[in-house]
Image (tube, grey):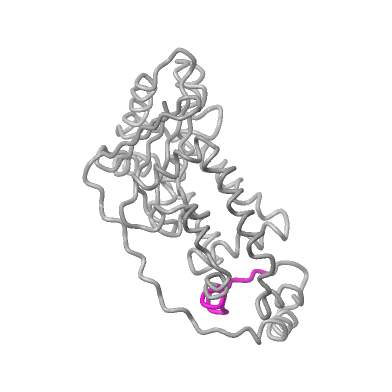
Amino acid sequence: MVLESERFIQPVFRQFNKERAVVLEERKLRVDNESVGKFLEQFLLEAFDKHPYRRPVIGFEEDILALTREDVESFFRKHYVPSTMTYSIVGNVKLNEVKAMAQKYFGDIQGEAPATAFIEPEPRQTAQKSLTLKLSSEPYYFEGYHIPALDDPMTPSLQVLSGVLSGSRTSRLYDNLIVKQRDALSASFSRGFPGDLYPSLGILYAAPFPGKSLDNLAKALSKQMELVKTPGNVTEVEVDRVKLGSKYGILKTFTSNEALAKVFAEYSATTGDPKNVFRALAALDAVIPGDVTRTADAVFRDDNRTVGKIL
């Protein structure tokens, strides 16, 4: 606690220019010189019109270059204050002793609660969007669908829907598109891109099998999307398999103090209560096939979709 508290009480922004250069190099590595990274940056700008999720976490090059030491220190003083911090301590400790240590080492951190920033909500999408880029890359196909935030009641059924479609060798995209039809080399659907504190994207991405076109891949994916929207098509066996795997994935994090601390801090920061991780397990267990079908029907709509292609 001693070392950690000093970073907040007396931060020293030494070697600012050197560290800014490191961030620029990281951006070049992950975005500017990486085809998929470059595409996803443009894809988010297309999919979101207003919400800050449209901007890359690392920042645009011109913004990084314009940063000054004063900008960084001002941001730190404004946002790295007690009211925005979440600490999670897990282990064989005594609560009173931990509280006393926290007060001793962190009690002197200054700062008022920053003014609540207005996060402009993303307006409802009313028509399909599209983005096509020619890059030095193998071809890829993407679809992004607007979905609710992590604390929305739809999240458990979205999690199961994601598992029905991808994530294992028994999932639909793997079994049909990769193994049986050979339409794709890879295919996956995941939720919460680029984050899940606010409404974000469920993103579908796939690489075509050699000799197969992106249009062919799009048709094959569309067929699978339509099937999970069809009442009675999603089976109880599928849902139970996904729920078991998902619950195992959550419970596996309880095997170490470090993992527990991380998941409790995450749920506290994003949902307001670390105990919501246990409520998430109960909500996941309550999902039935009809929930998955209704969620797929609500999400997989043309007017909720952004299509992306790397040629």
Instruction: Determine whether, in the image, residue 183 is placed left or right of residue 68.
Output: left
Q: Is residue 119 above or below residue 191?
A: below
Residue 77 included in the magenta stretch of the image? yes
Farthest residue, direction left: 126
Of all residues shown, which one is farthest toward the top? 211
Question: Where in the figure is residue 129, as x and y percent of width and height?
Answer: 28, 39
Q: In this view, does 309 lie above or below 282?
A: above
Asked if the magenta segment contains residue 45, the reply would be: no
Q: What stretch is highlighted in magenta?
A: 76-88
Quadrant housing the C terminus: top left
Quadrant hosting residue 70:
bottom right
- Please tell me which residue lies in front, 172 or 184: 184
- Classify the position of the N terminus by image quarter: bottom right
Residue 231, percent from left and from top: 30, 34
The vertical placement of 287 against 171, above or below, is below
User: At 72% from the left edge and 82% from the top edge, which residue is drawn?
Assistant: 105
